[in-house]
Image (spheres, rainbow, N blue to C red):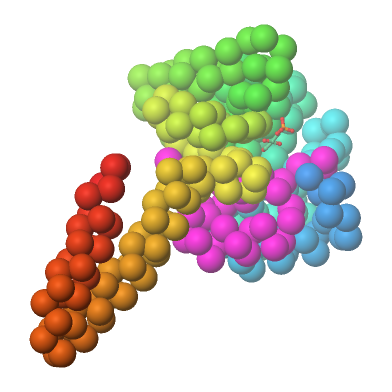
């Protein structure tokens, strides 16, 4: 499963790229509002960090307006994908963009049927919003499962992009449901990295390393001076490290 970062924050994107886990970026007007500046400049900068798809969202609600905005975004970089909302006008715009060879990400999908229509119109990415469905007590992940099944059953080329990801469990479930892509906030990416037992293990290994080195030095010194009791005590220290519970 590809991992996209759901942000317009350049530092977050640079960090994920350094970790080697970044396959692309999605932005939307709300994410853009958090960082400010010129949207076009931010998109260009993001496209310089990742060669993966970078979604740029149109805000026009009429077909010609969507086409105008999307064509301008597409000129910024070859990896721009124009994000178009699901609507009658959006479908028409997606179809026209496909004819022009401009890739699209159909956003604000909440049912498998909406996703099927977006795929038929020619969207390369289909974005069901998992978290927003969960928020209204519906099973967001079920839409991912249904849409992935439809796409695979009918050999459709569009990819299912699990959007509106709110926590690490969503990522595991999206991957197990066969989503081709999931886009997540940087905070959720950080949460995926961490586990309390990993943190505890790192500390314990460092402490054991220090104790073992000290015991080895003590044993060498004891042996060099013919101190048999000292050498035995050093061995007992090593035994205490290796015999503690959990090792
Ligand atoms: C991404 O393409 C979507 O715009 C985003 O995931 C929406 O997330 P939200 O529901 O947390 O705003």
Residue 193 versus residue 17 in the image, above or below: above
- Please name whichever residue, 144 or 187, is drawn nearer the observer in this view of the structure: 187
How far across and how far down the image is residue 85, in percent? 73, 30
Q: Residue drawn 88% across and 55% down?
A: 36
In the image, residue 3 lies in the stretch drawn in magenta: yes
Q: How many marks?
A: 0
Kindly give the residue lying farthest to the bottom in the view shown.
225
Give the vertical position of 62 relative to 237 (above or below). above
Query: Which part of the image, by quadrant, shows the N terminus?
Result: top left
Classify residue 53 as left or right of residue 72.
left
Position in image of residue 79 (x %, y %): 60, 57
* Relative side of 163 to 160, left or right: right
> Closer to the camera, 164 or 146?
164
Q: Is residue 15 magenta?
A: yes
Q: Where ligand 1 lies, by quadrant? A: top right
**Location of residue 241 by image quarter:** bottom left
Q: Position of residue 229 (x, y in %)?
A: 15, 73
Q: Which residues are magenta?
A: 1-30
* Front-lying residue, 197 or 37: 197
Residue at 29 percent across and 42 percent down: it is 246
Which quadrant of the view contains residue 46? Answer: bottom right
User: Where does the image place residue 101, in percent across and percent down from the top left?
Assistant: 59, 48
Residue at 72% x, 35% y: name it. Answer: 84
Q: Is residue 235 left or right of residue 190?
A: left
Q: Is residue 124 visible?
A: no
Residue at image point 53% right, 66% down:
18
Say whether residue 220 is left or right of residue 31: left
């Amino acid at each position: 499963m590809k991992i996209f970062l759901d942000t317009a924050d350049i530092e977050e994107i640079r960090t994920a790229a350094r970790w080697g886990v970044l396959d692309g970026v999605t932005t939307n007007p709300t994410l853009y509002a958090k960082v400010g500046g010129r949207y076009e400049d931010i998109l260009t900068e993001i496209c310089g960090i990742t060669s993966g798809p970078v979604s740029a969202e149109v805000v026009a609600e009429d077909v010609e307006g969507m086409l105008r905005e999307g064509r301008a975004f597409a000129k910024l970089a070859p990896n721009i994908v124009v994000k178009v909302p699901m609507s009658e006008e959006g479908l028409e715009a997606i179809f026209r963009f496909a004819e022009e060879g401009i890739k699209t990400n159909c956003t604000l999908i909440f049912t498998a049927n909406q996703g099927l229509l977006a795929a038929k119109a020619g969207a390369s990415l289909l974005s069901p919003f998992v978290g927003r469905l969960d928020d209204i007590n519906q099973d967001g992940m079920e839409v991912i499962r249904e849409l992935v099944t439809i796409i695979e059953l009918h050999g459709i080329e569009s990819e299912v992009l699990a959007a509106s990801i709110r926590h690490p469990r969503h990522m595991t479930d999206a991957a197990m449901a066969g989503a081709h892509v999931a886009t997540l906030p940087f905070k959720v990416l950080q949460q995926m990295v961490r586990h309390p037992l990993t943190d505890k293990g790192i500390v314990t290994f460092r402490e054991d390393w220090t104790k073992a080195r000290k015991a080895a030095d003590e044993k060498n010194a004891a042996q060099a001076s013919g101190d048999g009791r000292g050498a035995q005590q050093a061995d007992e220290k090593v035994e205490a490290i290796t015999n503690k519970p959990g090792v």
